[in-house]
């Protein structure tokens, strides 16, 4: 088995920039790997922790990662707002992954509720001018409404046949 090679401490800013770029390119595994390399030499690096949390949650929808892979990382965040906010992000993204995987809305509903509670708690600790938690809370509400509307539409149709509208876009 090969041994991992450490990166130089002065390369951290560049490495984190690359990790963010890989996230934006929808390559969360690559971003995760870079963040783990950064944390191997600077275990308290908050930017690397946040990017790692987001990279792991990016993989929820594909089933390549699980909730318990990211939850312990959130507790390593020093700032109270960040801990509460990213706990909410974790729960919201898990809920969205459940919806995407076809679980019934009730399964995701509990996770959306937990996320919204975390966002409410985070907002109480937000720096002035930072409404990130409110934006996420509102996104949860809208997603829950969308899920309910889609569920109601399916119930009204009473039609189990596959239509062209049911086929995902590629």
Image (cartoon, helix red, strand yellow):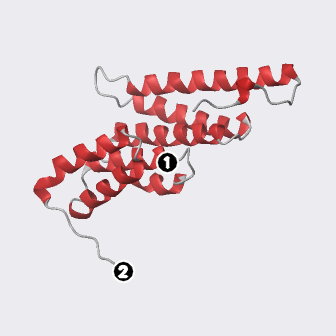
Residues packed near mark 2 inside 10 Å, few (<14), some (14 to 19) or many (20 plus)? few
Vertical placement of residue 121 versus 135, above or below: below
Does residue 59 appear to the left or right of 16 in the view shown?
A: right
Which numbered disc, 1 or 2, marks the residue that appears first in the sequence? 2
Q: Which quarter of the figure is the C terminus placed in?
A: top right
Q: Which residue is mark 1?
A: 59
Q: CA distance from mark 1 to mark 2?
A: 26 Å
Vertical placement of residue 125 versus 26, above or below: above
Residue 83 horizontal/vertical position (percent):
39, 43
Camera sees residue 43: no
In front of the other: 95 or 27: 27
Which picture quadrant has residue 141?
Answer: top right
Does residue 23 appear to the left or right of 18 in the view shown?
A: right
Residue 119 horizontal/vertical position (percent):
47, 31
Which picture quadrant has residue 145?
Answer: top right
Residue 33 horizontal/vertical position (percent):
34, 57
Q: Which residue is mark 2?
A: 1
């Amino acid at each position: 088995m090969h041994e991992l090679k450490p990166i130089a401490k002065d390369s951290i800013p560049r490495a984190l920039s690359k990790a963010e770029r890989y996230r934006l390119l929808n390559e969360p595994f690559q971003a995760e790997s870079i963040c783990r390399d950064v944390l191997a030499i600077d275990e308290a690096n908050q930017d690397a922790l946040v990017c790692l949390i987001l990279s792991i949650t990016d993989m929820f929808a594909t089933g390549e990662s699980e909730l318990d892979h990211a939850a312990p990382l959130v507790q390593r965040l020093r700032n109270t707002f960040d801990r509460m906010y990213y706990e909410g992000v974790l729960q919201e993204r898990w809920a969205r992954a459940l919806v995407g995987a076809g679980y019934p809305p009730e399964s995701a509903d509990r996770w959306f509720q937990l996320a919204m509670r975390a966002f409410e708690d985070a907002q109480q600790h937000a720096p002035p001018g930072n409404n990130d938690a409110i934006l996420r809370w509102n996104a949860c509400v809208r997603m829950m409404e969308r899920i309910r509307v889609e569920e109601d539409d399916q119930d009204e149709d009473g039609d189990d046949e596959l239509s062209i509208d049911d086929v995902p876009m590629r």
